[in-house]
Amino acid sequence: MNILVVDDDETLRLSLRFILEEHRHCVWEACDGKDALEKVQEYDFDLIFLDVNMPHLDGIETLKHIKKIEPQVFCVVLTAYCNVKDAVKAIKFGAYDYIEKPVTIEHVDSILSAAKKAKDLVKQMAFSAPQVRFAEGRMMIGNSSQIVKVYEMINKISEVDTSVLIQGESGTGKELVARAIHFNSKRKKRPFIAVNCAAIPESLIESEFFGHEKGAFTGAETKNIGKIRQAEGGSLFLDEIGDISLSMQVKLLRVLQEKTFLPLGSQKEEKADVRIIAAGNKDLESMVKAGTFRLDFFYRINIIPIVLPALRERLEDLEALVHFIID
């Protein structure tokens, strides 16, 4: 397995490395939370040993960030103090276990055995049902044929780097699916930025998306990089896409076609490296016919369509949903 040891104590790191390499595992070290997050961004780990008490960014905060980047990684928190509150916090935020220092060979053997079993179980499940990675603390409930088809679509869509249009009623999980597409794609280690298009005033929407230079308009006292730049290398989720004006559709169409955009007040075009995932509950085809939605923009965002079923269309999932809520 690929294992990361995070601790500001070099002696402990070396001790753990020795034990783990004796078991023929590949080991990386990080001296603090920042170093750990950089390595998690760069490499795929099966198991992370993480110290609670570190300077600057403590283990609990580091754990939260790790789980946002790699929701399914196996994390074990280490501490030199018997602190039940930290134990509860660590498990709440996704840690598998919590062990006290000094770490013994027996501790490590137990953790390695559990991690291997979990990894093997995931592999077995991959052959029996579609497996989809969701963001931390999020999941889709159900195993009906409709939901299984959604899982299959997510897996297929994630393999290609093109625009997606997710349609469905409010509450069907459009943002959840968008996040799953992102976290299963090659862009998973880059940002996922969600924008509710209906919530942004028309007078501010261009600045919100493209950013602006200082002094670009009254009140622009500082530079703003905008959502497209925030999502650099990742995915930009445009919810309620049917609420975007025709003029804004033209500007976003340029992003999709030319992969460039122009911040307000700037004379220099910037490159846009983002995947657009759009969603909405409006009938966009009817809007196209009515002239309230551009046909060319519709075709550009609708390269891969996915329609989410309402709960009333998959009643066999109701029992699983009720049990999840009760638990």
Image (cartoon, rainbow, N blue to C red):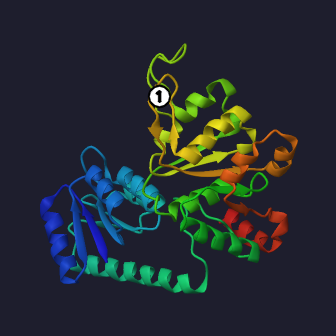
Residue 11 visible to the viewer: yes
Residue under the image location 42 percent in, 53 percent down: 64
Q: Which quadrant: the C terminus?
A: bottom right
Whether residue 107 is situated above or below residue 60 in the rendered picture: below
Find residue 170 and report its horizontal and vertical position in percent: 77, 51
Give the crowd class for mark 1: few <14, some 14-19, many >=20 residues within 10 Å: some
Which residue is more in the foreground, 283 or 253?
Answer: 253
Find residue 133 and report its horizontal and vertical position in percent: 53, 67
Residue tagged by mark 1?
Answer: 224
Name the side, left or right, on which 238 lies relative to 79. right
Name the side, left or right, on which 143 lies relative to 188. right
- Amino acid type at image mark 1: Asn
Name the side, left or right, on which 114 lies relative to 320. left
Q: Which quadrant: the N terminus?
A: bottom left
Per the image, label 1 sits on a secondary structure element best described as loop
Residue under the image location 60 percent in, 48 percent down: 237
Find residue 255 and report its horizontal and vertical position in percent: 56, 43
- Quarter of the rendering containing residue 125: bottom right
Which residue is more in the foreground, 189 or 81?
Answer: 189
> How many discs appear?
1
Which residue is more in the foreground, 3 or 242?
Answer: 242
